[in-house]
Amino acid sequence: MSTSDEFGEYASPPCFLHELQDGFQPQTSDPQAAADLKRWRKAERERLIAARLALSADERANHARAIAEKLDARLGDLAGKLVGLYWPFRGEPDLRGWADSVRARGGAIALPVVVAKATPLIFRVWKPGEKLEKGVWNIPVPAAGDPVLPDIVISPVVGFDPSSYRLGYGGGFYDRTLASMPRRPQAVIGVGYALQAIPTIYPQPFDIPMDAVLTEA
C-alpha cells in the first residue's frame, strides 16, 4: 500500500494537454465537431443511465454477484493489495459485499474522494465502522485519512466500447487520476452491465482505456 508521498510525476502527460495548452481542441480544431461530441456524450449518458436504472433491484444484485466472481477470477490473490473501489450510485453495480470479502482475504479497500472540480481524485482507505461524510452528488466518502495509491482501481462505467474506453459522468476525474499517478496501477478494471456496451465512445487524447471492462455477461 502506498501513501500520497508517491504522487508526483505523470503517467500520461499528454492527457493534460487540454488543460495546460490554451486553445487545445481534442483531436480536431473544429469547435463545432467538439461541441457535437459533447452533446452526443451527454445524450448517451442520459440514455444509458436510464437503462441501468430500469433494471430491477434483483437484476442488479444478480449482476453484481456475477461481476464479483469475474473480478476474483481476473485479479486472483488480493492479500496485501489495496483496491480502489467506489460507493454505488444511480444503479451502479453494488460491490460492497465483494469489498467485505477482499478485506476478509487480507486486502484493503480505498474509496475515491473528489477534492475539487477538474482535479484528480484522491483515495482514502476505509472499512465499515469508520466515519463517512457526504461528498459530491451526496456520495459517501471517508471523512478522514491520508491519500493512498491503490494497487488496483475498479471504476464504474456509464458506457464502454470494445477497446475498453470508459464513458463516465463527464467530469474527467478518473482520467485525470490515472494520468497523475506516478505509475499505472497493476490493474484498472471498469465494471458495468452488458446493456451499457456501445460501439465507440469516440475516444479523445485525454481518455485513458481500462485494462478490461467486466459485466455480468
Image: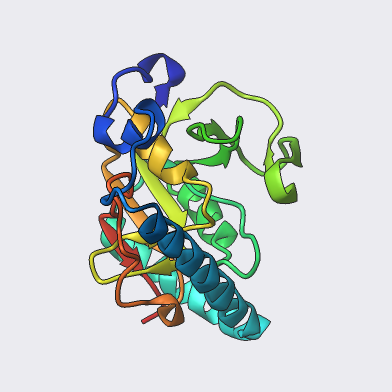
Provide residue 61's location: percent of width, then percent of height: 58, 77
- Which residue is depicted at the point 42% across and 70% down? 67
Residue 111 drawn above or below residue 95: above
Q: Which residue lies furthest to the top in this view?
A: 5
Q: Which of 212 and 109 is in front in this view?
A: 212
**Residue 17 visible in this rendered orientation of the protein:** yes
Q: In which quarter of the image is residue 22?
A: top left
Position of residue 96 measured from the top left corner of the image (x, y, whole percent): 58, 58
In the image shown, does 19 or 194 lie closer to the viewer? 19
Q: In which quarter of the image is residue 11?
A: top left
Number of marks in the rendered image: 0
Residue 106 visible in image: no
Q: Quadrant of the C terminus?
A: bottom left
Image coordinates for residue 94, horizontal then vertical, percent: 58, 65
| Horizontal side, residue 61 vs residue 17: left or right | right
Q: Quadrant of residue 81?
A: top left
Q: Is residue 200 left or right of residue 150?
A: left
Residue 135 x/y as whole percent? 71, 41
Q: From this view, report whether residue 20 is shown above or below residue 91.
A: above
Which residue is at a point 43% across and 64% down the rendered structure image?
Answer: 36
Residue sitting at 71 percent across and 50 percent down?
Answer: 137
* Structure colour scheme: rainbow
**In which quadrant of the rendered image does the N terminus lie?**
top left
Q: Which residue is drawn at 35% across and 68% down?
A: 214
